[in-house]
Image (spheres, coloured by chain):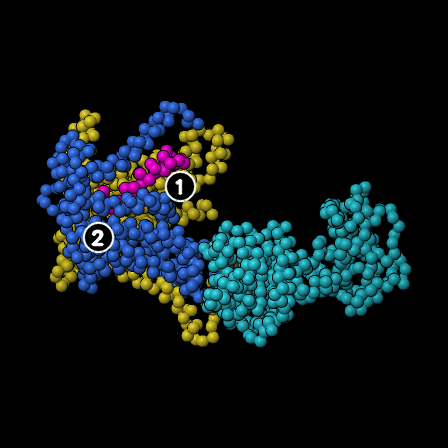
Chain colours: A yellow, B blue, C cyan
Amino acid sequence: MTLANPNEMINHKRERSTFSALNWVAIRPYMMIFPSIIVFTLFFLYPIGYMIYLSFYDWNFISPDKDYVGLSNFTALLQDPKFQQVLRNTFVYSFATVSLTISISLLLALWLNKKGAMYGFVQGAIFSPHIISLVSISMLWMWIMDTDYGLLNWFLNLFGIASIPWLTDPKTSLLSLIIVAVWKGIGYYTLIFIAGLQSIPKDIYEAAALDDTSKVRTFFKLTLPMLSPTLFFLTIIGLIGSFQVFETISIMTKGGPINSTNTIVYYIYENGFRFFKIGYASTAGVILLFVVGIFTFLYFKLLSRKVHYQS
Amino acid sequence: MKRNPIWTAVNGIGLLLLIFIFAMPFVWMISTSFKTLGETMTFPPKWIPNQLLWENFSRAWNSGPFLKYLLNSTIVSVGILVLQFATIIPAAYAFARYRFKGSNFFFGVTMVTLMIPTQLIFLPVYLQMSSWGLLDTLWALILPFASSAFGIFLLRQSFKQVPEELLEAARLDQASEWKIIMKIMVPMAKPVLITFGMFSFIAHWNDYFWPLVMTTTDASRTLPLGISKLREVDGGVAWNILMAGNLILVIPILFIFFFAQRQIIRAFVYTGVK
Amino acid sequence: MAEIRLVNIVKKFDEDTVVNNLNLTIEDGSFTVIVGPSGCGKSTTLRMIAGLETPTSGEIWIGDDCVTNVEPGKRNIAMVFQNYALYPTMTVRKNIEFGLVNKKVPKAERESLIREISEIVGLTDHLDKKPHQLSGGQRQRVALARAMVKKPKVFILDEPLSNLDAKLRGQMRRELIQLHKRLGTTFVYVTHDQVEAMSMGDQIILLDKGVTQQMDSPMNMYHDPNNVFTAEFIGTPPMNILERGHLNTVLPTLFENVKYVGFKPEHAEIIGETEERRTDHVVLQSEILTTETLGAETIYTVSNVAGMMNVKSFDNPITESNNVQIAIPYEKLYFFDEQKERIRFLEIDRAVSQPKPAIVGGV
């Protein structure tokens, strides 16, 4: 009798007198999901399988023959010092970007989580880079980070610091990309943290105030634990996103100088489209798939545990 | 509690600094786009150009088939949006409201798709498109996004919240399933649909990666790609032209953002949290 | 003709039998109330009549048509839901109009119907508002208007008043009775509230665990219950049911089958502790536990050898002492057998004098 009764769902497929009508009711749900499932299968699921298949072959895209090479793509790739550097770059970039973005935006969220037009404006301003095309962001920052005429070096000069060849020095190139990523990501993360902060019930703060809890203690004992699902979500999503960084590299550095900013997706792109090493590129893709898969799995694993706690 | 005037001043300066850090690059972009090439190469840099060089915009615009790019961008973004609405609404309704054999399996397929980023699969999709002869066509830019696992996920949540009684009332009112979807479910899920629509439109309008991979000629290039090609115009980098071109790309989005800031922020934050 | 007949209706959800072999006839033009505790199958029965559930077996007839497998929209039935189920994105006008548009009623006719109906329910000024702008009572009226506008053969109302506050509920109750008189259509009304059932229905169907307990007019329901279940369901407070075994000292020997004895709270009289024994009465030495003063009447909860029971009195509340006697006349006693079924035509033989009067009985 309750609305939640699952049997009511079955009863929506109302029996009709004729056989064909009955059939239509039975196939209707399949018809409704069919277009989407086709799209997902053709453009997401099948390609994954195809990519895994290709990783066992040596193929240059043009020749009609694919040579089966077993796991040799994997061994060659993992022994390749260039790919090792690519992996290192990807991980350094990802962990630095995510840890910096999260810590800065958490602080900003605590600061900006206030009512008022001024705070609304600031929130909007710091969010704005998130909806701008990465093409424009990359070009803008290339210009800002220009060694000779760039704005950034001018500021450093104002404080008596010598100009830095941001994008052209292998020592600073990856850092430059991290700065851009943090600048772009902060606003989005801050607003999500603010949403997280606002979903914390006010009464627990009132209870804490009545218990004469200090501000610092309130933050570490109440706010942070309550924010932990958000924190966790942003970390995983941020890492998965950063592993796939491509646009800024493609526009700002092209993986250089001397491979210092080459990361996995750019490496796949280079091998596939410039060197036509399809098998090799697919293998790198499989490795990325594996890494992303681990993090996704981790996310759901911990998420389900978290949900379990609450219920 | 924080009535201390020093605190208030520090807070205010902090906020201004924050705005400066995030607004300065855009101001710099605007400023550069009006400069002469010579003015871009001064150090210390000039904030305000001697005169507003409007012709930078026309030079940027005329340096390539930008009308074509704009048209392609519009067709792709709007086309994707229309197709997505057409596919995700019935799918979300089926997942939310029907019980059928394999529904869990198919929803699982959808969720797996949600986890697969396009950056992972571009190579095999490229090969596929090439074998179908769709490379360098707008189809290659539209079809892979003709449905959205994310959209189905969001909309299904929203459809599930509609009370069963409402559908029963409609059935007693002789409404067909189609009518129930269009007249009751969709209007009730309007906020979610708008949210998703903005999200999808902005993402595909801005997209650089997929068109870069799938197109080879101007016939199917989109605006972000066209802008990124500006660099190669004169050999050397003409920052003033480059910034003018980027401004053309950025202005529409900033303009929409200015008027629909609240909705856009909610769209992104909501879709992020959920 | 829109008589509704349910023939051998069984409804199972998986292994749960919610309605078990139900047979009932709802007369044309009647105001029939299906009442029972939650989980008794009343809403399921209603939903089967509406076509929102399909019976596991059995047949449903409306007039001369077997509608068991007919779609809900095609049964010529209108339903008012407990939560009104108004379409939240449509205005009041569109809500009322929705079913008419689906039935392809021409625009001009639709408009005159809406005008007519909204006048009857007093919504004329609110036609362009959305449901969330209306009060609970107004939403209720929209739900009614939406049902009425279709001019159905049968109105089905599923606990339509349960979301209203007490005062409004009373008012809507009266309005619904008037509406029924005015329309002359069959009303099928489901509620768990026996007061609603008694005050509105001209036919009451009392269900428990998917089985009909009694199908009768309100007054028969009250005065002539078929069994302990009916007796304990109807009345505020309901009948007191005592175990025969506890009454051995105060009641003459009864016909053997009698297992339970019942009396209505309003049929007992409270008399002073010291007052003379009355003849032809069951007299119980009692202690008052609680006193609920309702103004016109007072309800006492008393405790005695037979357990706890309610007594209703129209006199001023007793304040002097908690120790009283309660007296129930023999002719106001109801008798039930081991299966809790009523034993009728049982009379206490007054000719035999105390202390051990005999009982003659017949079934």
Tag 1 residue: A196
Q: Is residue A168 left or right of residue B194?
A: left
Residue C242, x across and y down, in percent: 75, 56
Q: Nearer the viewer, residue C254 or C315?
A: C315
Question: Do marks 1 and 2 share a subunit?
Answer: no
Instruction: Say which amino acid is labelled 1.
Output: Gly
Magenta span contains residue A116: yes
Q: In this picture, is B224 found above or below A143?
A: below
Query: On what subunit does the disc labeled 1 rest?
Result: A
Instruction: Kindly tell me whether residue C358 is visible in this rendering.
Output: yes
Magenta span main SS: helix
* The one of A81 and B161 positioned closer to us in this rendering: B161
Q: Residue at x 38, y 61 (%)?
A: B90
Q: Quadrant of the N terminus of chain B?
A: top left
User: Could you say where residue C294 lies in the image, as x and y percent from the top left?
Assistant: 72, 47
Residue C124 located within the stretch drawn in magenta:
no
Residue A69 visible at all: no
Q: Is residue B54 above or below residue A297?
A: above
Rendering coords of residue B167 (x, y %): 47, 61
Q: Which residues are magenta?
A: A109-137
Q: Residues within 10 Å of mark 1 (few under 14, many from 20)?
A: many
The residue most toward the left is B235
Cα separation between marks 1 and 2: 38 Å
**Residue located beneath label 2 in the image:** B70
Chain letter of mark 2 equals B
Q: Quadrant of residue B239?
A: top left
Residue at 11%, 36% in the rendered image: B38
Q: Which mark is residue C328?
A: none
**Which residue occupies the foreground of this view, A271 or C236?**
C236
Helix, strand or loop at mark 1: helix
Residue positioned 37% across, 65% down in the render: A30
Quadrant of residue B7 in the image? top left
